[in-house]
Amino acid sequence: MAIKVLLDTDIGSDIDDAVCLAYLLAQPKCELLGITTVSGEADRRAMLASVLCKVAGKCVPIFPGTERPLLVSQRQPVAAQASALSRWAHDAAFPRAGAVEFMRRTVYENPGEVVLLSIGPLTNVALLFAVDRDVARLLKGLVMMCGLFTKRLPGVGPAEWNAGCDPHATAVVYQTSVRTHRSVGLDVTRRVTMKADEVRRHFRAPLLEPVLDFAQVWFQKRDTITFHDPLAAVSLFDGGLCRFERGTVSVELADEESAGTTYWRSGHGGPHQVAVDVDPQRFFDRYFSVFR
């Protein structure tokens, strides 16, 4: 049976959001109920999402969401990949100020059936849980690309990007009880990477052509794509791809310099599941299989 998915994304910053959305649109077992965007220039992020939906030939509701974090300053005010919009057909008008209500209504219309996939800062998700205390228990699950749990990484600050962009929202989400509360963190996603020349060889499917175009901005400053968000998405459809352990996640808020840092305490009775291992080759096989 198809899995009903709501996607909350900051598409337009790191290229992996577009890589993730292309997969969801191509995955025959995914029923994508809607897309909400988060962070600066939410409208332009929605336009980027609409490019992929049009190429896929699918009519998916898209709602620009919250642009500013709950309390801290904005760390990603623009969607740099929007420079490619002039080369692709896309919608330019979207419902105003309705993303959180759309998420809430969709969950209520499909009780116990929706997986909320969050691959950006958690502002929209935190507001959803704040405005309606019952909506979390009606989710089938919450799966996030968020956090850093099992080890610290050289050159990476204490807080993973999505968690640190809105640390107070991150804390709200981890304090909310959800039937299945899963995190795929940076310590695991860093194991699924691909160099630019290899990306260009593999991204040949029509649905990956706009993604490759969006990526030109990304490749101006780096030569690698890390499949952070796609790993979280593919894990929805392959239960053996990642190994998850149960425990408790807490979020740093007291120290401004490390706000958003995620702390992991393993324990079988904990409310959170954290990815601790992945099979990289299995991931790439599963990801590209939907484009053949």
Image (spheres, rainbow, N blue to C red):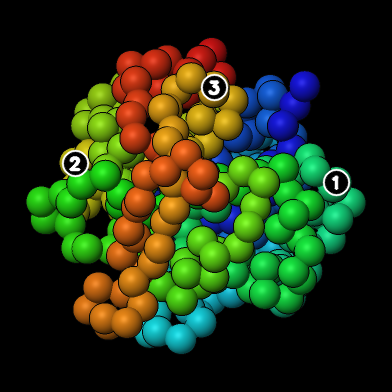
Three-letter amino acid code of the residue under disc 1: Asn
- Residue at image point 85% right, 46% down: 110
Q: Position of residue 58 (x, y in %)?
A: 74, 38
Q: CA distance from mark 2 to mark 3?
A: 28 Å
**Residue 227 picture quarter:** top left
Q: Quadrant of the N terminus?
A: top right
Q: SS class of the residue under badge 1?
A: loop
For disc 3, the neighbor class at 10 Å (few under 14, some 14 to 19, many from 20) is few
- Determine which residue is flagged by label 1: 110
Upstream in sequence: badge 1 or badge 2: 1
Does residue 288 appear left or right of residue 43 in this picture?
Answer: left
Mark 1 and mark 2: Cα distance apart in space? 41 Å
State the residue at coordinates (34%, 52%). Answer: 264
Residue 72: name its quadrant: bottom left
- Asked if the residues shown at circle 2 and circle 3 are in contact, with their CB atoms under 8 angstroms apart, the answer is no
Do callouts 1 and 2 mark residues in contact (Cβ within 8 Å)?
A: no
Q: Looking at this view, is 176 or 115 the one in front?
A: 176
For the residue pair 95 and 68, the one nearer the viewer reads as 68
Residue 50: x percent and y percent?
Answer: 64, 51
The residue singled out by tag 2 in the image is 223
Could you tell whether 52 is left or right of 264 in the image? right
The residue under the point 34% across, 71% down is: 252
N-terminal label among 2 and 3: 2
Q: Residues within 10 Å of mark 1 (few under 14, many from 20)?
A: few
Q: Which residue is mark 3?
A: 238
Q: What number of labels is visible?
A: 3
Q: Amino acid at mark 3?
A: Asp
Q: Is label 2 or label 3 in front? A: 3
